Amino acid sequence: MDVICPLDVEFSDKISLLLKPPSSEDVQNYFDKIIEERQCIGLKIKQDGEFGKGIYADSEFKEGDLVLKDQMLVGAQHSSNKVDCLVCSYCFRFIGSIELQIGRKLYLQQLGSSVRKECDTETYSHISKKCRLDDSSDEEDDSHRTSHNEGSCSNSQQKETVPLPEEVLESLLKGDVKLPYADQFNLPSSVPCPGGCDEAQYCSKFCADADWELFHSSLCTGKNSVSSSRESILKFIEHANETNDIFILAAKAISSTISRYKKLKEAQTEQQVRFTGQNGIDSSGFSFLLEAWKPMSMGYKRRWWDCVALPDDVDSCDEASFRMEIKELAFQSLDLLKKAIFVKECAPLFSLEIYGQIIGMFELNNLDLVVASPVEDYFLYVDDLPDKEKEEAERITRPFLDALGDDYSASCEGSAFFPLQSCMNHSCCPNAKAFKREEDKDGQATIIALRPISKGEEVTISYIDEDLPFEERQALLADYGFRCKCKKCRGENP
Ligand SMILES: C[S@@+](CC[C@H](N)C(=O)[O-])C[C@H]1O[C@@H](n2cnc3c(N)ncnc32)[C@H](O)[C@@H]1O
């Protein structure tokens, strides 16, 4: 039986308006403004390309040039990665100190609270926590690919680790033990969540305030949280962690839209009262909701349960029940979210149609969020020391490296939606790629030219491993909802 969400029926007109494709003028203005704000000199957006909108070079780029640095609209660290790395919950920069990063990871691992390293066998594993096929972590560079919100599963052939006494880890955590040369790797100190929860920590007050204003104030479970439904938020988060952490991203997208809505409405009310002495705002405030939704309206989207590719282990005759199963899963999640953060004035955002479209948008556009670990840099630094210094340093650092095992260099991993980068079309012979450089220590997307790009040429990236054979490429691209029609594919399959 089909899932019926009462809000979809009650607000069908408003939902249609929210999902109506924006006019080409609105699209152009929106992206031109972002290009200007990001100071992406030499790029422009065009809407009349073969595959809809795309990014084009407006000047020449040489091989290795930075083409674009894009800030995320919404992003989250994978829940399974939180044991490995302590990062700013807003910009995903590593925080604390080398000692804290190592001590915390070993402490949590040894406490046995780790949920990582298990290639899930839960009911929904085929749609949520797939092992990454296109894992870029074993490439020598730090490139990141468009992602499908999977928690990456580590190599099962891990070297045995050698645990350390709890007292040693506690001293590391408290800052009583200083590791040699760790002061060469200064990390920003941790700024606590204004709501008092332990889940979110920041690299600066700026990030703490920005996250609070946009996302976290409605999703915080701390004692100073403004939310009246801490229990419900916890239940929603628990469900997302157990099934698919893309739901956390969807919740962040909804809470940021609500927060923009409230700000727009407040500003307009203030202005009206100042000029007329009365509040003449339309009580439904739907025009503000439309405006607040604008960043989401610009993303390429389809309903999640319609666009997700059929997993290999699901027979095509079971396709309808598979799609119904994930629709029901989305409905369960939405129900928990409604109990946690529902705002009556923004009710259409809590319809299943909108929820499905938001998740579908992330499925089709998201990029893997990867930030390299300073702990890896630290151990490499020690390894590169002159023999005498290295021997002395390693006497202290070796037990920590042995306790960490092969996984000592785990990066921060997550998934994020980037407004400009998500306009880049795919090519199996791309001229650019997502690539983190030495200085890219946060969660921004960095796109670098792979070869010279001439003025007027479209900038393309590969969403998958483009060196795979034709059919394998098409199978992977099915996860992004299309069959590739790039030059290389046309050549191989005319
Ligand atoms: C991330 S979006 C890129 C922006 C998109 N063109 C738009 O109009 O918003 C990805 C979608 O663009 C289209 N697309 C991108 N590259 C393509 C390719 N090489 N062949 C066919 N369609 C492609 C597909 O519809 C795909 O689902």
Image (cartoon, grey):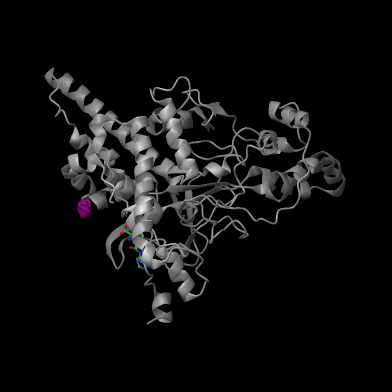
Q: Magenta segment, which residues?
A: 21-25
Q: Position of residue 396 (x, y in %)?
A: 82, 38
Percent position (x, y) of residue 108? 66, 36
Where residue 240 sits, quadrant-wise, is top left
Figure check: 187 above or below 458: above
Taking 475 as reference, is 366 above or below it? above
Q: Residue furthest front?
A: 1
**Residue 174: % across, % down:** 70, 26
Q: Is residue 455 visible?
A: no
State left or right for residue 454 relative to residue 403: left
Prevailing secondary structure of the magenta residues: loop
Instruction: Evaluate whether residue 339 shows in this view.
Output: yes
Q: Position of residue 187 (x, y in %)?
A: 62, 35
Ligand 1 found in image quarter: bottom left
- Residue at position x 39%, y 72% in the image: 486
Q: Give whichever of 134, 394 is nearer the camera.
A: 134
Q: Residue furthest top?
A: 277
Which quadrant of the figure contains the C terminus?
Answer: bottom left
Does residue 91 appear to the left or right of 418 in the view shown? Answer: right
Q: Is residue 446 above or below residue 199?
A: below
Q: Is residue 248 magenta?
A: no
Closer to the camera in the image, 126 or 51: 126
Tell me what residue is drawn at x 38 percent, y 29 percent: 218
Residue under the image location 55 percent in, 39 percent down: 93
Residue placed most toward the observer, 231 or 33: 231
